[in-house]
Image: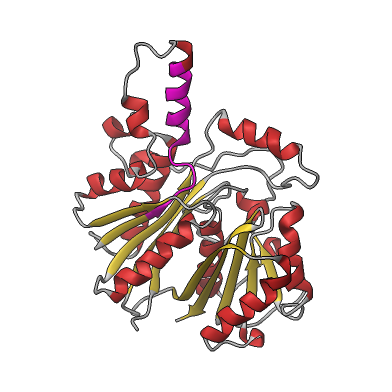
Amino acid sequence: MKKCFVHSAVSISAQNTFDNVQFLSDGKTLSEEKTNAMYPDFKQFIAATSLRRMATGVKMGVTAAKKALKDADLKMPDAILTGTGLGCITETEKFLTVLITDNELYLTPTSFIQSTHNTVGGAIALDLQCKSYNNTFTNGANSFESSLIDAKLSLEEGLKNILVGGIDELGTEFVDYLNLVEKQREKPVKVALSEGAQFFVLSSEAKNAVAEVVDVEISGSISEENIESKLKLFLNENYIFEEEIDAVIFGKNGDGFDAYYEILQNGIFSETQQLHYKHLCGEYFTASSFGFWVGTQILKFQNVPEILKLNSNQKRNYKTILLYNQLKGNNHSFVLLKRC
């Protein structure tokens, strides 16, 4: 089987991560109910004539993608694979608002056309004039991981360099409805609702790689009673013992379903360094791509910022990192990363 290596990792998030001169050295816990990403200067990557017509998610996606290609010293990928939970939700909101206010009359199709989930992948391809394989996955909180799986399969089929990303934008109205529903729950999400775009160049070549993506597994649902055995099976299939995991990164958001993470924290990973990240990037369907970015940066810099730590266990060297994420007890994902 061909291996899968990460050659560049770029993040646009609610933290100062785009230039990433120092890995989360100025990271701060988000305190608002909803928080926009810290947008870079889009004009450095997108022509002004195109920029004014783009939705926020498209701007973030195209910019992060182009920087990821630049950092990997790659001009043209063999495939573009994106994951998104809501697509360009702002354009969807615009279309529905006009639909209501104009009583379904005098509709223009522009917002509807630009609201589709594959808008970001298409915009990247148009900007690069890339006519290669292009696919978008909308699979809830497993959207980004689905694109990772497709990337690994594509490398097996002979492709060499693949651009992979996870994008979601905050929007203006739908997020308020989500907040309202969340507040009615007994144990609501405690982190901010946010947005972001993370892009990576994956390749079958190990030279100059940041990390190796050993395996990715997704599950629609797992019971709390079976989560530990399911994870052990995933590790066994990759010939990894629990004690070989140098750090485990959890997608904790403070709601009642954090019980899944707590089972592992108090069980097989009680002696392992435990980390989390959604208090920094917020919650959104592809927030796990930020966690993936965190994992690659730990392997690259061999350092864990204090703001990521859940316990006092730590390592001097980081060789193997496990990421586990779920949302509302569904869309579970395990991602195994190794240092090159």
From what the image shows, is residue 172 above or below residue 18? Answer: above
- Residue 127's x, y, as percent? 25, 45
Could you tell whether 334 is left or right of 49 in the image? right
For the residue pair 317 and 218, the one nearer the viewer reads as 218
Q: Residue at x 32, y 19 (%)?
A: 108
Could you tell whether 65 is left or right of 179 in the image? left
How many marks the image carries: the answer is 0
User: Is residue 41 at least partly visible in the picture?
Assistant: no
For the residue pair 250 and 18, the one nearer the viewer reads as 250
For the residue pair 299 and 129, the one nearer the viewer reads as 129
From what the image shows, is residue 24 above or below residue 160? Answer: above
Displayed quadrant of residue 33: top right
Could you tell whether 308 is left or right of 73 in the image? right
Region of the chain picked out in magenta, as a range: 82-99
- Residue 165's x, y, as percent? 41, 56
- Membership of 129 in magenta stretch: no
